[in-house]
Image: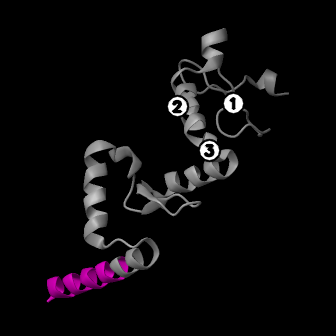
Amino acid sequence: MKRAMAKNKQQKADAAKNARLKRFFRIDLEEYRKVEAYEQEHCPVLLGTTRRALDHQHQTGQLRGILDWRINRALGLVENAFHEDTPKVLQSLAWYLMHFPVTTVLGPRYGIIGKAKKKKVMIYGSPTGPTKPSKKARK
């Protein structure tokens, strides 16, 4: 009985998702799952968690793929700020994350851990892990 209820619940969820996909994006759940399977094979990191979003270009409506909802949101912010330069900005950002400029120019340096703001106890990074300043330095 529980299996039947779970199956019915899943069928209702699938029907609702199918209706939403058709209404907003003009594809059905079967097509969505084909794209999802393709991405799972080629770029699974973009899928992230189970909360996914069908990504589309806002200016043209063209469907692009399925992304973790947070990546989709971040991409929208970058696109709104940089428009047609978005691919160049994202490629540059990937380079930046793989080749820290400070490390390249000055060698490894460490600053505050977490958000850069004044805290009761300032904790800094180091090659061996987090470090707290001595009591003398805190005064």
Q: Is residue 43 left or right of residue 79?
A: left
* Residue matched to label 1: 112
Question: Helix or strand or loop: what does disc 1 sit on?
Answer: loop
* Residue matched to label 3: 84
The residue drawn where x is 59% and y is 60% is 59
Question: Helix or strand or loop: what does disc 2 sit on?
Answer: helix
**Above or below for 32 versus 64:** below
Could you say where residue 138 lies in the image, as x and y percent from the top left?
Answer: 80, 27
The residue drawn where x is 62% and y is 49% is 79
Q: Count neighbours of disc 1 (C-alpha within 10 A) and say few if under 14, some if 14 to 19, many if 20 or more.
A: some
Ranked by sequence position, the earlier of labels 2 and 1 is 2
Task: Return the residue nearer the eye: 55 or 11.
Answer: 55
Q: Count neighbours of disc 2 (C-alpha within 10 A) and say few if under 14, some if 14 to 19, many if 20 or more.
A: few
Kind of residue at badge 2: Ala
Picture disc at residue 94: 2
Could you say where residue 74 lies in the image, as x and y percent from the top left?
Answer: 57, 51
